[in-house]
Image: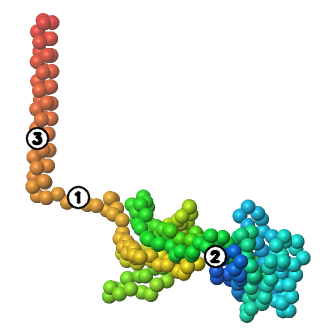
Amino acid sequence: MLFLPAAALCCLCSALVSMAAELVQDDLTLTRRVGQNVSFSCGRTDQCSSSYVWWYQKKETETFRVILDISRSTGSIDKSYNHPEKDDFTAVNKGNGCELKIEKVKVDHSASYYCSCWIRYWYYIFGSGTKLYVTASGEQVLKPVVSVYPAASRDHLEGKSSLLCVASDMFPPLVQFSWKIQKKKEDDSWDESSPAEGEQLELRESGRSASILLLHQPQNSTYKYRCEVKHEGGTVEAQTQQEISTFPPENPRQKVFVPSQYQVKLLCLLYTVLIVKSLVYCCGLSLLRILTDNGASSNYT
């Protein structure tokens, strides 16, 4: 009876390890002119249980297609996957990884390229992919212009805040955002930068990309945030850093109104006037009732 739970736990742990594993492709994009050569790197293949690493091509309007596989031990290449451009590609093992190469790129080679292998129990892992841009007009790689702004939101009224990082005017247009955080110490110095935690939303449109970071900071604290953008032209930091301070939100229920002595006297006078007016009104009604009853008795007699 104990064997089944143990086996299930083992499978679950293996699945979690497989989900956490990933092959490393450092290049987000690569830009080449027609006729130039290019190579795509794939690292951390020591995680693979399979003897082979597969390379895939993904074009914008097509599905994944296997180009070839390469033996991790012998370096032999298999191109028996009927890829229409298989003769344009080759591969080689290099250190703790491998590379996919194209000697002379063509416009048709514009696509994203992924490496893959399988690990325990036939779980496949992939690299993050590298997108190839092939230009015929000689377009140059342009670094993005990066700026950070406080994002307008109702969350600020609820003790939260958010930051907006915008990258624009870059080629190729693909970028990768990351946020860094520094905490202010009691002596007004700053801690070393570390990755910022929080919900992130990325927006992409023609010519620009943006990342929104929703902040959940401890109260009574001050932090400095910096946006970094990874691009083929290099990593670019925001020109300005945003410093955010958080304080406990005001609670209306905790507010206590303490009137001044003058206000107390004025309130007492007001209440006295109201009481006197009420007494006069009641006495007037009583007198009117008595006079009405006496008049009625006289007429009856």
Residue 57 in view, yes or no: yes
Left/right placement of residue 101 relative to residue 207 reads: right
Horizontal and vertical percent for residue 186?
Answer: 34, 85
Residue where numbered disc 1 is placed: 257
**Is 90 or 18 nearer to us in this picture?**
90
Locate the C terminus and report the quarter of the image it occupies. Answer: top left
Task: Please name the colour scheme applied to the rendered image.
Answer: rainbow
Residue that badge 2 annotates: 31
**Residue depicted at x 10% and y 41%:** 273
Q: Is residue 168 left or right of residue 36?
A: left
Residue 122 as seen in the image, left or right of residue 114: right
| Residue marked by disc 3 | 273
Q: Nearer the viewer, mark 3 or mark 1?
A: 1
Q: Which mark is residue 178?
A: none
- Judged from the image, the secondary structure of the residue bearing numbered disc 3 is helix
Identify the residue at the far right of this view: 80
State the residue in front, 88 or 157: 88
Q: Position of residue 196 (x, y in %)?
A: 50, 77
- What residue is rendered at 83% in x and 90% in y? 75
Q: Earlier in the sequence, mark 3 or mark 2?
A: 2
How busy is the neighbourhood of tag 2: few (under 14 within 10 Å), some, or many (20 plus)?
many
What crowding class fits label 1: few (fewer than 14 Cα within 10 Å), some (14-19), or many (20 or more)? few
